[in-house]
């Protein structure tokens, strides 16, 4: 129970009126202690080497940016607010939450086809948003194609454009595109 105290305190500060916030220096120091303590207690369990936190408070002109940890697990240089992180699959949850929020606002439904929203991809016109969210769309993954692997081996640090990534799997643009998947496919 004790380990939840610091995040709970932080959450209370984040929802309190601006006048209720402690001084900027006091808040920064308290939050820094919280993320340092969290990293110390959870880094081995969660295999995490660093934390970066950015907080935007209503009525404040600048974010509070804090970091703890190092760029590599078990070493590396200390992280700074300027470091970039690979977010990996965490974006799936954020995307799903955003889509469901749009559905709650009646701006779309998850049973609409992506053809309605992305008509430039007629090969996938009947795929629904629901299928995209539950990973049953049949759209293959670009990162499992020979062309993507060749490009990656040639230059592992190159950033591909969205158009290039789609071209790896889009059937009418690429005769070597993988066949659609069936069932659940991560």
Image: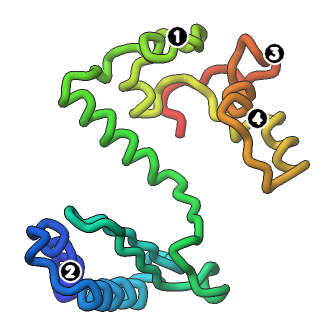
Q: Residue at x 19, y 69 (%)?
A: 14
Q: Residue at x 58, y 8 (%)?
A: 122
Q: CA distance from mark 1 to mark 2?
A: 47 Å
Element type at mark 1: loop
Q: Quadrant of residue 145?
A: top right
Identify the colour scheme used. Answer: rainbow
* Quarter of the image that includes the N terminus: bottom left
Q: How many dots with numbers?
A: 4
Query: Are circles 2 and 4 on residues that touch, CB within 8 Å?
Result: no
Apparent side of residue 73 relative to residue 54 in the rendered image (left or right):
right
Q: Nearer the viewer, residue 104 or 141?
A: 104
Element type at mark 3: loop
Q: CA distance from mark 3 to mark 2?
A: 53 Å
Q: Residue at x 56, y 64 (%)?
A: 85
Mark 3 = which residue? 175
Q: Quadrant of residue 23?
A: bottom left
Q: Give the percent coordinates (x, y) of residue 17.
A: 9, 68
Which of the marked residues, 1 or 3, is nearer the chain's N terminus?
A: 1
Which of the marked residues, 3 or 4, is nearer the chain's N terminus?
A: 4
Q: Is residue 102 above or below residue 1?
A: above
Mark 1 = which residue? 119
Mark 2 = which residue? 4
Which of the marked residues, 3 or 2, is nearer the chain's N terminus?
A: 2
Crowding at dot 3, Cα within 10 Å, few <14 / some 14-19 / many 20+, comes out as: few
The numbered dot on residue 145 is 4
Q: Give the percent coordinates (x, y) of residue 78.
A: 59, 86
Crowding at dot 2, Cα within 10 Å, few <14 / some 14-19 / many 20+, comes out as: few
Q: Is residue 1 above or below residue 58?
A: below
Q: Residue at x 20, y 22 (%)?
A: 106
């Amino acid at each position: 129970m004790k380990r939840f105290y610091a995040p709970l305190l932080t959450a209370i500060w984040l929802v309190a009126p601006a006048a209720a916030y402690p001084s900027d220096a006091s808040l920064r120091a308290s939050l820094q202690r919280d993320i340092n303590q969290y990293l110390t207690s959870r880094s081995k369990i969660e295999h995490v080497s660093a934390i970066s936190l950015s907080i935007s408070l209503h009525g404040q002109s600048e974010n509070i940016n804090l970091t703890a940890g190092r760029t590599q697990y078990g070493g590396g240089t200390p992280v700074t607010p300027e470091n970039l992180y690979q977010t990996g699959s965490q974006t799936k949850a954020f995307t799903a939450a955003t889509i469901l929020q749009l559905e709650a606002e009646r701006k779309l439904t998850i049973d609409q086809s992506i053809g309605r929203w992305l008509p430039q991809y007629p090969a996938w016109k009947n795929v629904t948003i629901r299928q995209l969210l539950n990973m049953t769309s049949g759209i293959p993954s670009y990162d499992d194609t020979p062309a993507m692997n060749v490009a990656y081996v040639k230059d592992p640090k190159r950033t591909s454009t969205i158009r290039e990534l789609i071209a790896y799997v889009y059937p009418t643009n690429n005769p070597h595109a993988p066949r659609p998947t069936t069932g659940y496919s991560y």
